[in-house]
Each structure stands twice: as C-alpha cells, then as structure tokens.
Image (cartoon, helix red, strand yellow):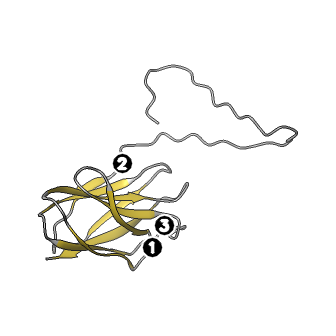
C-alpha cells in the first residue's frame, strides 16, 4: 500500500468473538518493485526481491501470431509452489501462469495481438529471493 500522506497511521486487529491471544506485527518499507525488459530468444534475466511485499515484472514486445513460453530457473524463493509467474496481454488480462519454482514453465502461448506483454512475478507471502527467467519462442 502506498501511503497517501505523511502522518501517523494505526494498524487495527480485530480477533474473532471469544478469541484470546497475542500477535506480532512487522511493518516493512517496501521499495519500488523490480522491473526489466526481456527479449524473445535473448539472454535470461535475473530479478530479485529484498523486502516482503515486492513483486517483479518483465516486459517484452510481442507480435500477433508469435508463440512464446517462459522458463523459470535458479529460483531460491522458499515457497515456490505458492508464488506465481503470470503472462499478461497488453490489456493486462492473464493469459497463462506457472509457479515460481526452478524449472517451472509457462507452456507455449500464441500471442493474439501486437503490443507490450508483461511477465508478472508474485512471490508467496513474506518470501524474498531471486529467479532467472528465459523467454523462448518464434
């Protein structure tokens, strides 16, 4: 969440009726999300997060009729099966997805329109780490 103004904010917790206990809260100053461009058939790109709450994204120019796939390698995110890698069309709609594990693949997808496509990467929960992404296709 981006805070709209400078000031004092309150974190409120409301337990269920009859619940008793304690909780520990951690507040993070989350820097900008890491972004990069990736080229079809080009070199792999490594991105990483340093603070829980960060997401990552890669963009590439695609042409209608192209076929692409995305391969994730060298992922060191602890909860790989819960994190996601999603291919998004120029209008932002999701086209295909995979988990954020090493050797995970978004299988071949046919691009329907020409434009800028996004590979949106969302680590699970409070996970931080890095992974390498390769954009294959023709």
Q: Is residue 134 above or below residue 123?
A: below
Name the residue at 88% across, 39% down.
18
The one nearer the camera, 133 or 26, is: 133
Q: Residues within 10 Å of mark 3 (few under 14, many from 20)?
A: many
User: Which residue is denoted by mark 1 in the rendering?
Assistant: 101
Task: Tell me the distance, in whole angstroms, between the alpha carbons under discs 1 and 3.
Answer: 7 Å
Q: At numbered mark 1, what does the secondary structure look like: helix, strand or loop? A: loop
Q: Quadrant of residue 97?
A: bottom left
Q: Residue at x 39, y 80 (%)?
A: 103
Q: Position of residue 86 (x, y in %)?
A: 36, 62
Comparing labels 1 and 3, the label whose residue is closer to the camera: 1
- Name the residue that disc number 2 marks: 33
Residue 11 against residue 41 in the figure, above or below:
above
The crowding category of the residue bearing disc 1, from other C-alpha atoms within 10 Å (few below 14, some 14 to 19, many at least 20), is many
Relative to 25, say whether 117 is above or below. Answer: below
Q: Secondary structure at mark 2?
A: loop
- What's the distance in space between the residues labelled 2 and 1, CA to CA? 20 Å
The location of residue 120, given as percent across then percent down, is 34, 57
Name the residue furthest bottom.
Answer: 103
Residue 43 visible to an observer of this rendering: no
Distance from disc 2 to disc 3, alpha carbons, whole Å, reads 16 Å
Q: Residue at x 44, y 54 (%)?
A: 50
**Residue 84 image offset from top left, x and y in percent:** 44, 63
Q: Residue 96's spot in the image, x, y percent?
A: 35, 66
Counting labels gives: 3
Residue on which the image places disc 3? 77
CB-based contact (under 8 Å), mark 1 and mark 3: yes
Tag 2–tag 1 contact (CB < 8 Å): no
Q: Is residue 75 left or right of residue 106?
A: right
């Amino acid at each position: 969440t981006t805070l709209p103004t400078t000031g004092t904010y309150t974190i409120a917790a409301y337990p269920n009726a009859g619940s008793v206990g304690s909780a520990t809260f951690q507040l993070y100053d989350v820097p900008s999300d890491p972004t990069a461009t990736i080229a079809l058939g080009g070199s792999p790109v490594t991105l990483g997060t340093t603070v829980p709450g960060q997401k990552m994204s890669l963009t590439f120019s695609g042409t209608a009729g192209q076929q692409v796939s995305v391969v994730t390698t060298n992922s060191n995110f602890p909860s790989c099966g819960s994190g996601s890698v999603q291919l998004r069309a120029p209008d932002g709609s999701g086209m295909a997805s995979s988990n954020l594990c090493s050797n995970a693949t978004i299988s071949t997808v046919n691009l329907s329109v020409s434009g800028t496509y996004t590979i949106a990467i969302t680590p699970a929960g409070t996970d931080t780490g890095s992974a390498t992404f390769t954009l294959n296709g023709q």
